[in-house]
Image: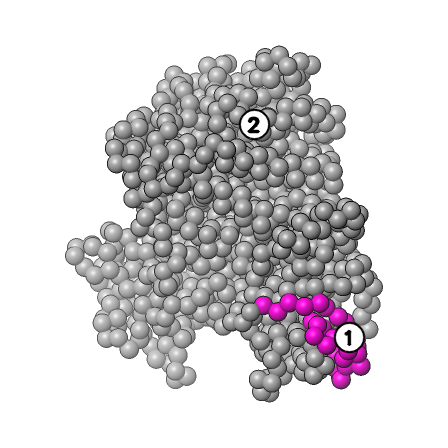
Amino acid sequence: MSGAGGRGCGSPVPQRAPWSLVAATAAFCLVSATSVWTAGAEPMSREEKQKLGNQVLEMFDHAYGNYMEHAYPADELMPLTCRGRVRGQEPSRGDVDDALGKFSLTLIDSLDTLVVLNKTKEFEDAVRKVLRDVNLDNDVVVSVFETNIRVLGGLLGGHSLAIMLKEKGEYMQWYNDELLQMAKQLGYKLLPAFNTTSGLPYPRINLKFGIRKPEARTGTETDTCTACAGTLILEFAALSRFTGATIFEEYARKALDFLWEKRQRSSNLVGVTINIHTGDWVRKDSGVGAGIDSYYEYLLKAYVLLGDDSFLERFNTHYDAIMRYISQPPLLLDVHIHKPMLNARTWMDALLAFFPGLQVLKGDIRPAIETHEMLYQVIKKHNFLPEAFTTDFRVHWAQHPLRPEFAESTYFLYKATGDPYYLEVGKTLIENLNKYARVPCGFAAMKDVRTGSHEDRMDSFFLAEMFKYLYLLFADKEDIIFDIEDYIFTTEAHLLPLWLSTTNQSISKKNTTSEYTELDDSNFDWTCPNTQILFPNDPLYAQSIREPLKNVVDKSCPRGIIRVEESFRSGAKPPLRARDFMATNPEHLEILKKMGVSLIHLKDGRVQLVQHAIQAASSIDAEDGLRFMQEMIELSSQQQKEQQLPPRAVQIVSHPFFGRVVLTAGPAQFGLDLSKHKETRGFVASSKPYNGCSELTNPEAVMGKIALIQRGQCMFAEKARNIQNAGAIGGIVIDDNEGSSSDTAPLFQMAGDGKDTDDIKIPMLFLFSKEGSIILDAIREYEEVEVLLSDKAKDRDPEMENEEQSSPENDSQNQSAEQVSSSSQEVDSVDQESSEENSLNSPPESLSPADMDNAASISPSEQTSNPTENHETTNLNGECTDLDNQLQEQSETEEDSNPNVSWGKKVQPIDSILADWNEDIEAFEMMEKDEL
């Protein structure tokens, strides 16, 4: 569930798995799915469900077929450039590349999906390819976590369904546990990672050379994320139960035992990152998203699969803490493990979307419905779930790598309630994927959900999970060739049979949980619920829970979330929030004084805030003061960023692109504002002279068209005036820095010339070299190229596309279009955190009131991670501002630039690209490691 492909611990964080509404092991009972559906949503007809199921099959064929055609045996498909992603042959994306091990990752991750989708012949062919082509002895450093959930889990899931098909007697009659033998080989390759005093594994390992050897190039790490160390038990235990080799389950249990022992005893929460040698918490914030997510999932599912009560007791203890501190319905906000009443941040990441599904498995249906509905409202606003969004539902991180967690929770809620509302939710997901993410060579991740721009990336988890959940959502029992409820899903949605619970049980089941904590019996109220408890007689139950949340995202200026405990503590008023603070309000000043916060008016008109925790009226007021200071730091940073303009989009709408290609463009501080006026559509033409710095010599060529201009040699505003005088309806300035790309550089914002620019009436956008070369290549190939300049990508033109599809020339021309794309389309971005997000740092870690004795002031120019250091706030008021513009952008006045640019060259040396990225990579190494 915690989806792979971008999480913490140096490698992406886990993905979660579906609950299996299933039957019983020795110590397990769980709600059985019944078709209890609530009124308010019309039942979906069998015909429409079949139609949507068939649509999912076609979408999978499009993704899987393009991977096999254009990428295999590479690990993943690059859908924009129609080629495979091979480790070492593409610019490094940081930790996200640790999932790639030159072992045909997408094929292995897709094995059991093929069977779920009834593609048994394709499954048999895929297994033969894995056995013939895949090598697990490569000299490459990989993530232990990702390799476990994707590759080991994929092999075990494939083996589980291979033996099921063999027993049925039609397919796989030749199969003799070959996938299991590969899984065992891989398991032994991962074991050296556990060679630590704590039993927690190193985050990375070399498949060929292991750990610490000079040639291994790994083994020096000290930290790992909680999910990375705590998401091993299902795969490792299954490997032990399948093979009889107990060592795998023993190692995974030891890691879980250590994490449980190191939890914060007073709050029963765990942090995000832990030192694998000392057991000290490195990052002390706690939530249910990136870095922790699948740790909780695997505790509950280990109980389901293995029948060990201690796992259930641990899960329930953690769950009680989550609902006590982190859950603020419908939100789930990170807190500090030592001060769980203090929020650690004011935004949420997309990986927490798995949690409603886990709550369904737990049997706690109401909060599951609430959080799922909140997430759905965010999706309806942005088409996809942004990687992170704020408590008032603005975009924090704009990417979306086609994560499946929300689809997973949708499936679970439908299975538990039978409510057709969730079928409609699934239908929306299908429509959005086809409308915004589908490209000729597969499905492309969204680089920015606000503009609709793409990233050249299709992670393996998209095939392993997304299509599995969507197909199961619309499938009836007879549509699946085996009983899905005989299996439990891993975090990567791989299937493990429940009969493993009674196989090769050689591991002692010492119940160590009660040694650490006195359990509250109420934790177990939901262990074995029945449908009467889950679904009261009121047929509008689920709808009544969702209804208050229908407009939660669209409220114009929602207040901050305030805890009930804080709001009504001793009958006092809710604590003051930074967004509401006014320096001229005497009541606010009195509240600040109570919190130990002093206000100083500086000579330049700014206001400085200083906190002395020792001067606060109480320790609770000191905590409120610390939270207020942290909010003020974030608010100040946000307001600075909001002065910048958001990115724009250049969309190629002519044949054969039809809007599939969307390029991220930088805005201009002058000319037509595309966010306030209708988009500009027209054919493009190159200006002469190319730099646009003098009167155009080809006005007839640009008349009524969008002029292409080269950056350099004069001011942007001068270029705009020259093309406007020639009759152009818009302008695109293409960077003269060869090889520059929006993937690797901050968004560029064109400034004026210091004079009045009201005379410029046409829209002007800026494209980096690589994005600009896509348009230039298209002109060379097709001559007539039409583009759309807008604030975000628009819907494609299905009528024109359908007409062209019926044309006999279509196939060959589309092939040429793919070649144009492959020559220059958007190339590899730096993991999840492009430098557009450089200013989006995590909130500072909390300190105890005793640590706040020294004066603390707030200053935007000195934003540090320690709230005791100096900070200043400026322009603070209670107005509601648009946080969608939270991107760090470059606003420059352009003067001299190298005019001798060769526009025929498009390839920049890899060393040069990496050098350009180096500064950003180093600056955000910790964010990349622990957040993404």
Between disc 2 and disc 1, the foreground one is 1
Instruction: Compare residues 444 and 439 and report the one nearer the observer.
Output: 439
Mark 1, residues whose alpha carbon is within 10 Å: few (<14), some, or many (≥20)? some
Whether the residues at callouts 2 and 1 have beta carbons within 8 Å, the answer is: no
Locate residue 733, reporting x and y percent.
Answer: 69, 71
Residue shown at 74% from the left, 29% from the top: 133
Q: 31 left or right of 20?
A: left
Q: Residue 701: which disc? A: 1
Q: Residue 116: which disc? A: 2
User: Which amino acid is tagged 2?
Assistant: Val
Residue shown at 71% from the left, 47% from the top: 805
User: Which amino acid is tagged 1?
Assistant: Ala
Residue shown at 42% from the left, 39% from the top: 422
Mark 2, residues whose alpha carbon is within 10 Å: few (<14), some, or many (≥20)? many
**Circle 2 — which element?**
helix
Point out the residue furthest to the left here: 571
Residue range corresponding to the magenta coloring:
679-707
Instruction: Compare residues 37 and 576 and report the one nearer the observer.
Output: 37
Q: Is residue 698 magenta?
A: yes
Locate residue 467, reporting x and y percent.
Answer: 56, 36
The correct choice, above or below, for 303 with respect to 714 in the image is above
Q: Is residue 826 magenta?
A: no
- Colour scheme of the picture: one colour
